[in-house]
Amino acid sequence: MEVAPGIHSIPVDTWTFMGLYAPNVYLVLGEKAALIDSGYDDIETVGKRLEYIKEFAPQKLEYILVTHPHPDHIGGCRSIRKSTGAKIVLHSSAVARARNKYRVVPDILAEDGDILDIGGLSLEIIHTPGHSPASVCVYIRESKTLFSGDHILGIGTTVVDAPEGDMTQYIDSLKKLLSYDIRLICPGHGPPIKEAKRKIQELIAHRQERELQVLACLRQGRKNLARLVAEIYPELDYRLLELAQRQVLAHLRKLVREKKVIASGGEYALK
Ligand SMILES: [Zn+2]
């Protein structure tokens, strides 16, 4: 499905994995082609992706750019490389995890600001840690399109959960993106986002509000993590408890780093 001129989101059957939450895999067409992310590593969906690439990209698939080393984004890249001869591109900070967890060894190591040329299109790698330390976004300068991986989602809120996720980095990475002129965001999950600047500002404001909530809870006295989570998410589904704890922990770590909160004996207090 073409979401913008020369940019296809390769459809996945909605019954696979998490339905609407299934990862987006994008095919970008210049004189050569590039894939942004590779989806899960299962024969059925990888096979469908390969068929789609064959049908819509007669030009050579040159690169597979992986936004971050999580299974729904990096999983399929080895199989797709094997069938197409494309080169896997990873940010240098993703290499150890990619190799140890997914047995993926990249062909090209990218750093922040690096540009890959696919003939008529320049793909800039922007290091945006936060959701994971190794997250990157990919920016097409010519069409002002941003592929945001899981840093910005078209549906729901990005998980920023300690210890892997880092709230300070996440907010800083969002602020970094505000300096780019973005017309369209193609997220790792959910539909494309048109009002990029407003969306990014909303995301920053959302985390700042949550942070104020944490500080307000601590103003009433010192509390442990479980108590804070119970107060911040009063009607939480127990299945989401651990995730909520790790997200609140990410906020607390940021506040401790900024010396607004002190942690001692498993409890947190305002400084
Ligand atoms: Zn994802």
Image (tube, rainbow, N blue to C red):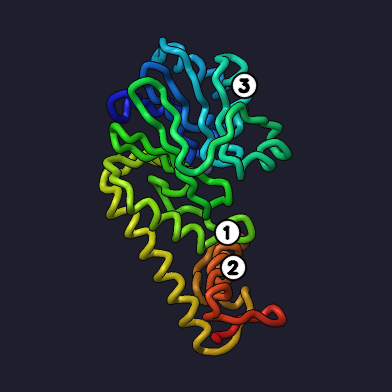
Q: Which residue is found at the position 55% from the left and 41% from the top?
A: 68
Q: Which mark is residue 249?
A: 2
Q: Give the residue type at disc 2.
A: Leu
Q: Nearer the viewer, residue 190 or 256?
A: 256
| Residue receiving disc 1 | 161
Residue at horizontal 53%, vertical 57%? 160
Q: Amino acid at mark 3?
A: Ser
Q: Which mark is residue 79?
A: 3
Residue drawn at (58%, 29%) of the image: 108
Which amino acid type is shown beneath numbered disc 1?
Asp
SS at mark 2? helix
Q: CA distance from mark 1 to mark 2?
A: 7 Å
Q: Is residue 195 left or right of residue 47?
A: left
Dot 3: element: helix
| Quarter occupied by residue 69 | top right
**Badge 1 vs badge 2, beta-carbon distance below 8 Å:** yes
Q: Is mark 3 within 8 Å of ligand 1?
A: no
Task: Provide the secondary structure element on which disc 1 rests.
Answer: loop
Residue 118 shown left or right of residue 250 in the figure:
left
Determine whether label 2 and label 3 are within 8 Å by CB.
no
